[in-house]
Amino acid sequence: MDGNGRWAKKRGFPRTEGHRQGLMTARKLVQNCISKKIPQLTLFAFSQENFNRPPQEVNALLQIFSEAVSAWQQELKKNGVRLRFIGELERFPKALRLLMNSLQNQTKTGQNISLAVAVGYSGRWDILQAARRTADNFSEESFVAALATADMPPLDFLIRTGGEKRISNFMLWQAAYAELYFTDVLWPDFSDDDLQTALDSFADRERRFGHLSR
Ligand code: IPE
Ligand code: MG
């Protein structure tokens, strides 16, 4: 979800305004994915590298994130969203971790969509933590089962907004056969129509997984 800062700058707003607007976009997108019967959605909200931004910005992001976690509760439950957070959650303040935990527990029975919010996540971290945890009994199967994405379906489609054409340390292992989609649309502007355009592109692709065309 890239482009919040630029969206704000274009309008002469502080960057935090872009993050707030980006959160609204995320909320709408979850609704839209439910209507489209998309069973699994992951939002890359905050990378490990984002901790290196100026403290003012990190604090603002944590503040918005905390507010969202509280404000989103009823909506998620009402809409049957099963929420989980993936990433190195230990890097977040204790109070926020408790909120995240409680939200996960409260939405455990959601049936309409499984939503993963990646925070303090990085693809290399995920590979390393899974490797560490399985070192004694290593196999591809045990490794994959130790990744943060263990009980999610395979990553089919990866959308990056905001114009950059790179993966930026997202799901490195998981993206092996993901279809990639890059759009210049800044995240706060990413609309229902933009999602549909992206999905139309996905539908047009032939996924061969290294095999020959059928
Ligand atoms: C993405 O928007 C949101 C987060 C990384 C939290 P940016 O903050 O990267 O926005 P730009 O790239 O500066 O426009
Ligand atoms: Mg950015």
Image: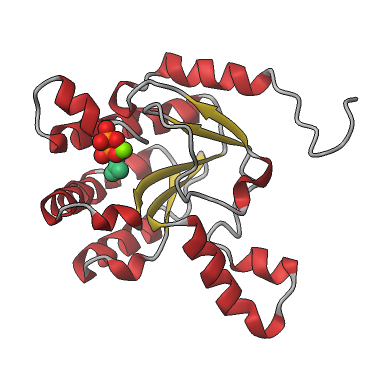
Taking the spot 68% from the left edge, 41% from the top edge, the residue there is 177
Above or below, comparing residue 93 to residue 38 in the picture: below
Taking the spot 23% from the left edge, 28% from the top edge, the residue there is 6
In the displayed structure image, the side of residue 3 where residue 93 appears, left or right: left
Taking the spot 57% from the left edge, 38% from the top edge, the residue there is 39
Q: Position of residue 48 (x, y in %)?
A: 35, 58
Quarter of the image where the C terminus is located: top right
Q: Is residue 23 visible?
A: no
Quarter of the image where the N terminus is located: top left
Q: Position of residue 179 (x, y in %)?
A: 63, 33
Taking the spot 44% from the left edge, 57% from the top edge, the residue there is 122
Q: Position of residue 88 (x, y in %)?
A: 39, 65
**Which residue is farthest front?**
165
Q: Position of residue 5 (x, y in %)?
A: 22, 33
Above or below, comparing residue 200 to residue 107 in the picture: above
Residue 148 vs residue 205, the one in the foreground? 205
Q: Quadrant of ligand 1?
A: top left
In the displayed structure image, the side of residue 59 where residue 104 appears, left or right: right
Q: Is residue 120 visible?
A: yes
To which quarter of the image does residue 96 belong? bottom left
